[in-house]
Amino acid sequence: MNEDTVDLRAGSPDVEKVGRIEAAKALSITSDIWLRGFMVAVVSSIFIWLNWQIIDLVRDAMQSDLAQMAAKPPLPATERLITSNVIMSLIGATVVQTGVGFIAITSYLFPKRMAQEA
């Protein structure tokens, strides 16, 4: 046999080499799947934690507003911490953050394949 031919008989070194290569590819794919799943969990956890902190901040500001409105004399509406503009800004920021989070996770889970050269 010359160098360009492959011996495909059972037990030949070429068949064993192909088997080891396929096993390595399968292990690589499995490892990649687990790593991607782990990273999605990490990014999602960070996203949830950060948004929870914002919710806590707004809750604390609302409690401060309520306490000041109950005080004598009450807090004028123009002096409140939580106004309609604040609520609209938080809703807009949350929508943008959610969109960016989904785009980041989706692009990580489903990367674009490089065009194969002909």
Image (cartoon, helix red, strand yellow):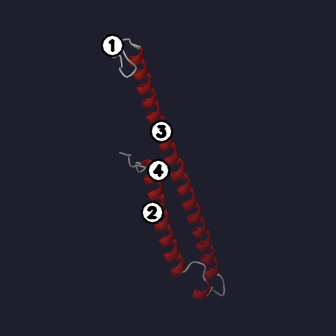
What residue is pinned by disc 1?
Answer: 9
* Amino acid type for the residue under numbered disc 3: Asp
Q: Which of the two discs, 4 and 2, sits closer to the camera?
A: 4
What residue is pinned by disc 2?
Answer: 99
Q: Secondary structure at mark 1?
A: loop
The mark found on residue 106 in the picture is: none
**Mark 2 or 3, nearer chain start:** 3
Quarter of the C terminus within the rendering: top left
Residue at horizontal 57 percent and vertical 86 percent from the top: 77
**Mark 4 or 2, nearer chain start:** 2
Q: Secondary structure at mark 3?
A: helix
* Amino acid type for the residue under numbered disc 1: Arg
Q: Position of residue 38 (x, y in %)?
A: 51, 43
**Mark 4 or 1, nearer chain start:** 1
Nearer-the-camera pick, 77 or 6: 6
> Quadrant location of residue 9?
top left
Q: Which of the two discs, 2 and 3, sits closer to the camera?
A: 3
Q: Residue furthest left?
A: 9
* Amino acid type for the residue under numbered disc 2: Gly
The mark found on residue 32 in the picture is: 3
What residue is pinned by disc 4?
Answer: 108
In the rendered image of this protein, does residue 104 appear above or below residue 21?
Answer: below
> Quadrant location of residue 80?
bottom right
Q: Residues within 10 Å of mark 4 (few under 14, many from 20)?
A: few
